[in-house]
Amino acid sequence: MKTSKLTVVKIGGSVLERAPAGEAVLDHVARAWRDGDEILVVHGGGAELSRWLGRLGIATRFVDGQRVTTAEILQVALMVLGGLVNRRVVEALVRRDCPAVGLTGADGAGSLALPVEDGLGAVGRIVSINAPFYLDLLAARRVPVVASLAWGPEHGWLNVNADLMAAGLAAGLRARRLVLMTDVDGVLDETGSIIPVLDVEALQALIERGAARDGMIPKLRACRQALEGRVPEIVIAPDFPGAPGVAAGTRVVAGTARVPAPRGATMRGDG
């Protein structure tokens, strides 16, 4: 199976909320589709979810950049991520003449998940992809917009980190590129400078030494997962690669990056 034109794009809720940058991100995604790329969007929405939890008086906490998801939080996540945020992204792309199709990982039995079992509650990891379901949509020139929620036959609905879900889809669909959009210019070292290239060794060192914090931890784990799935191009950046006036971000490569191993790195969590 080969999908050489496919780019899987993870768009965090904080990216979409940045004005006018969020609008520009969607412009660039739609332009890439019009130029002939196949696009699959995975979105988070952690900031919006946190706001709704606050309105409802439901406490929330994070462990290593992932939200601890109780049964009560899961119900709100289904409404906010699978409903409100997903509808917003679909609407924004349709307004740009991009035929978006709003989904969760459960729709079409597209993604099967199992619990991560790290004390996170109803949080899952993608273990299999129904590739024909997504490939049929892509072949019809549709743009799947997938909320970071999945389903397992024994455990029901599970909240899935959007970066890790995007990596699972990119690997399962043999995408040519995975783009993890974030609210900073890439992976930053301890001086605030962008690390232009990370190889597997440097990436793993950031995780093992505890230099990665908050939302960066699942992002780097997602990069490692995509590398293991042989996704040839992986980018962490604030916008679509090649967009005018946009930072190039951080490329993650399988081989030796030929740059000094970073001593520290930061990135805010962005849903």
Image (cartoon, grey):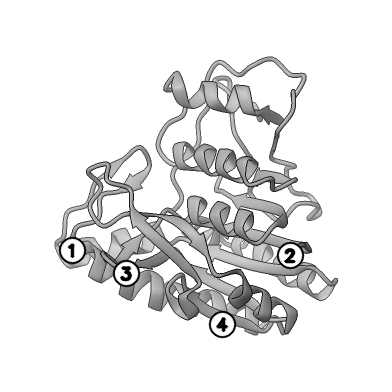
Evaluate whether residue 21 shows in this view: no
- Secondary structure beneath dot 4 equals helix
Callout 1: few (<14), some (14-19), or many (20+) C-alpha neighbours within 10 Å? few
User: On the image, numbered disc 4 is attached to which residue?
Assistant: 91
Q: Mark 4 to mark 3: distance in Å?
A: 31 Å
Amino acid tagged 1: Ala
Q: Please name which of the two marks, 3 or 1, marks the residue nearer to the observer.
A: 3
**Residue at 54% over, 20% down:** 190
- The mark tally for this picture is 4
- Disc nearer the start of the sequence (1/4): 1
255, 98: nearer the viewer: 255
Residue at mark 1 to residue at mark 2: CA–CA distance: 37 Å
- First in sequence: mark 2 or mark 4? 2
Point 58% across, 20% down: residue: 191
Residue ID for mark 1: 71
Judged from the image, the secondary structure of the residue bearing numbered disc 3 is loop
Return the mark for residue 127: none
According to the picture, the residue beneath numbered tag 2 turns out to be 28
Instruction: Determine whether label 1 and label 4 are within 8 Å by CB.
Output: no
Res 30 quadrant in image: bottom right
Can residue 70 be seen at all in this image of the molecule?
Answer: yes
What amino acid is found at the position of numbered circle 2 in the picture?
His
Provide the residue designation for mark 3: 153
Q: What is the quadrant of residue 140 in the picture?
A: bottom right
Q: Point out residue 155 in the picture as x, y percentages from the top left corner.
A: 26, 64
